[in-house]
Image (cartoon, rainbow, N blue to C red):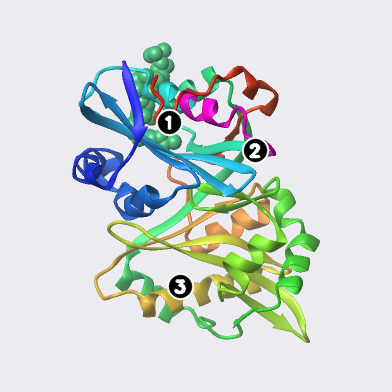
Amino acid sequence: MFRIRRMTAADKPAMMEISALILEGNDYLPTVFDAWVADRNGEFAAVLLGDRLVGCGKLTFLTPADAWLEGLRKDPRVTEKGLAESLGRHFLGMLADRPGLASVRFSTYVKNAASIDANERMGFMLRTRLSLKTWEGTREQLAGRAESAPAAGQGAETLRDTAAVQAFFDGRGYFTATEGLLVDGWKAYPCSPALLAARYVTAGRCRGVVVDGEIEAALIESPAVEHRRYAVRIVALESRDDRSALLLLDDLRARHAAAAPPGSNMAIEWIVPNVHRMKEWCAAWGLSSWELEDDYLVYQFPLDRLPGFVAHGKGGSS
Ligand SMILES: CC(C)(COP(=O)(O)OP(=O)(O)OC[C@H]1O[C@@H](n2cnc3c(N)ncnc32)[C@H](O)[C@@H]1OP(=O)(O)O)[C@@H](O)C(=O)NCCC(=O)NCCS
């Protein structure tokens, strides 16, 4: 029987040991552990068998109304089943009587059968399918590609007018194609003008091509904090023409090849909506799927079923 309590700083060594054994050693947990322990809005939960720490999960509030489940991990040396379901029920119980809740979601990879099975069994339903596209290599490989691209870095500028950026993406239907989600790695935020402004545009994370005062193309990016490599996420990319889209991708490549320390392993990632021309930009530029299309799934819990979940007591257990 799993027990659940809040994670503490003292759990870090044991949790890091588990993290190193899963996801081929590429787990992002080490980079977020301290911030997750400090997050008092949500809950970073430790899962125990007896007194032994065997896993974790995190409830995060993307906004006060939007709950996001992430960081689900189990020690692969543990054979007891049902950790995902125990933790899911714990979090759903905590959310059951929260006023004003608008969404409860998580994302997963299409082949993650353990996560999908456990969550579907609890009642989570598939909401959105997107495609995870990545380029991976060394900084030197990326720099080489940038130098060979004649337009690299030219013609692009930082866009600071949030209203114009928002109008451009809205007018082209980008966030309709993502079904209202602003996808930043494995987190998918409900897209809003406030988020776009605060997290990206005023932070200088939007580059664009502007012709005669009009946005021709725009790319929003986010630095991905990863354990062992320098990674960059494309959060959104839209363009009126193919050339400007590829120009912004080359601009991104040139800037980050210059910024990364020599010898870095690098990753560039875009979770792309199901739009043919966007997938053509990916193919032209070298962003490819791990195995298949439509591999990034966002699940959602039907809110009308939440009252059925009984909240566990403080530091609750399952
Ligand atoms: C996700 C994770 C926490 C699940 O642990 P768990 O809940 O204890 O998993 P279980 O062993 O109880 O499996 C849950 C269900 O998934 C299914 N399942 C598990 N592994 C499977 C596999 N390799 N192939 C097919 N189905 C599988 C089974 O249907 C199982 O239910 P069952 O009781 O009917 O057998 C664990 O697998 C893990 O730590 N994975 C690595 C990290 C990760 O992927 N996190 C999730 C990110 S979204």
Mark 3 CB in 8 Å range of ligand 1? no
In this picture, residue 65 sits left or right of residue 253:
right
Query: Magenta span has 195?
Result: no
Q: Residue 273: x, y in percent?
A: 63, 49
Q: Residue 25: x, y in percent?
A: 25, 45
Magenta-tinted stretch: 89-100
Mark 2 CB in 8 Å range of ligand 1? no
Q: Residue 116: x, y in percent?
A: 48, 26
Q: Earlier in the sequence, mark 1 or mark 3?
A: 1
Nearest the viewer among 46 and 225 is: 46
Disc 2 residue type? Ser
Above or below for 168 versus 273? below
In this picture, residue 74 sits left or right of residue 173:
left
Disc number at residue 103? Answer: 2
CA distance separating discs 1 and 2: 22 Å
Q: How many marks?
A: 3
- Asked if one can make out residue 104 in the rendered structure from this viewpoint, the answer is yes
Above or below for 19 versus 240? above
Query: Which corner quadrant holds the C terminus?
Result: top left
Tell which residue pokes out farthest to the right in this image.
171
The residue positioned 70% from the left and 72% from the top of the image is 162
Residue beneath disc 3: 253
Above or below for 56 versus 246? above
Disc 3 residue type? Arg
Mark 1 CB in 8 Å range of ligand 1? yes
Q: Earlier in the sequence, mark 2 or mark 3?
A: 2
Residue beneath disc 1: 112
Q: Which quadrant of the view contains residue 256?
A: bottom left
Question: Where's ligand 1: which quadrant?
Answer: top left
